[in-house]
Image (tube, rainbow, N blue to C red):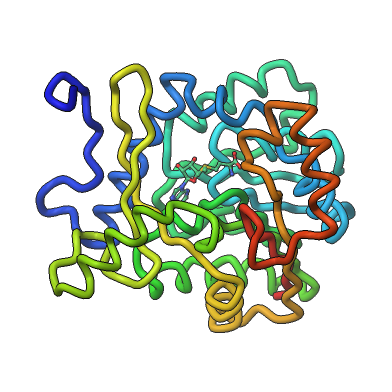
Amino acid sequence: MMAEQNVIQAVMPGEEDGLGVEAMIARSYERYYATGLYDRRYPKHNARSMAAILEVGGKARSILDFGCGDGRYTLPLLHTTQAHVYGYDICPMGLSGLKTRLTNENQLDRVTLVQGPVDDYTQGNPIDLAIIMFGVLGHVAGRANRIAILRRIRTLLQVEGEGRLVISVPNANRRFRTEQREHDALRIAGTPEKPALEAGDILYARDNDGERIELFYHLFTPETLSAELREAGFGDIVMRVESVLSESAVTRSRLCAAADALLYPVTPLALGYGILATARA
Ligand SMILES: C[S@@+](CC[C@H](N)C(=O)[O-])C[C@H]1O[C@@H](n2cnc3c(N)ncnc32)[C@H](O)[C@@H]1O
């Protein structure tokens, strides 16, 4: 019953601006990681996405994992590249989970964890690969705020001249259709639920044993993702389906991963569960 649930509220009074949403997201992810729900839903990285990262950035010397969480991609990157890896996130619990996982690693000098919110994601160091994996950018409210983040990342990449970006985002054609209809209707009626003010914005919740963890999400189409990347100055944008079945299915079940591999070649970009793009700075 709602009344008995512990609700991590999407937006607290007075937190409707971009910064307030950032604080709310950090708070919600504290619970998402602390309850173990995130790791149960997504126990490992998406193998195909990791292959796409290595395809463009396998030889990178310095990598930013923006919104690294508890390190689903940070650790595999440490294992498969020679790069220094910067893990940036606004959620202390995600970073502390990653720190725990790193205790068994013997190449700790190749990892720097940066806790946000700050504007300098790598403590002033240039990078030649940035990854923003599995919807991180979708948690940023306001197109202008997302483009500002992409521009900051591009500036870090431009120091090297050949910088590459790999990003994956939720596909509006596949995700949260009910919530999209509800928030579209509210916006059309002139009564949007803050902070879901712009087309593609929604509020949704994850349930964990009676606790509701509420989150803001901006959903993308291939066109809107491409437009935001271009506006931030990225070029050579190549998009593909991230997975056909849900991320949770393909990272939890070998059978689902095998089914996904069969469906992948015949699934058009517009119908992927997530959209993965690579781009050049
Ligand atoms: C869906 S998780 C993805 C985590 C990781 N990239 C992965 O694939 O498992 C989203 C992560 O983005 C982080 N995040 C959300 N908004 C952020 C922001 N504005 N800056 C940095 N990290 C952010 C959250 O704290 C959370 O750890």
Task: Specify whether 58 is left or right of 173.
Answer: right
Q: Residue at x 39, y 50 (%)?
A: 117
Return the x and y of residue 95 as percentages of the image width and height.
51, 32
Q: Residue at x 47, y 73 (%)?
A: 147
Q: Nearer the viewer, residue 38 or 104?
A: 38
Residue 218 to residue 93: above or below: below
Return the x and y of residue 153 as percentages of the image width and height.
58, 66
Return the x and y of residue 207 as percentages of the image width and height.
36, 28
Task: Specify whether 276 is left or right of 217.
Answer: right
Quarter of the rendering occupied by the N terminus: top left
Residue 176 to residue 197: above or below: above
Q: Nearer the viewer, residue 167 or 242?
A: 242
Q: Nearer the viewer, residue 51 or 75?
A: 51
Task: Specify whether 172 is left or right of 71.
Answer: left
Return the x and y of residue 242 as percentages of the image width and height.
70, 53
Q: Quadrant of residue 55?
A: bottom right
Quarter of the rendering occupied by the C terminus: bottom right
Q: Residue at x 42, y 56 (%)?
A: 177
Task: Specify whether 59 is left or right of 202.
Answer: right
Q: Nearer the viewer, residue 27 or 276?
A: 276
Instruction: State the count of labels.
Output: 0
Q: Residue at x 29, y 46 (%)?
A: 23
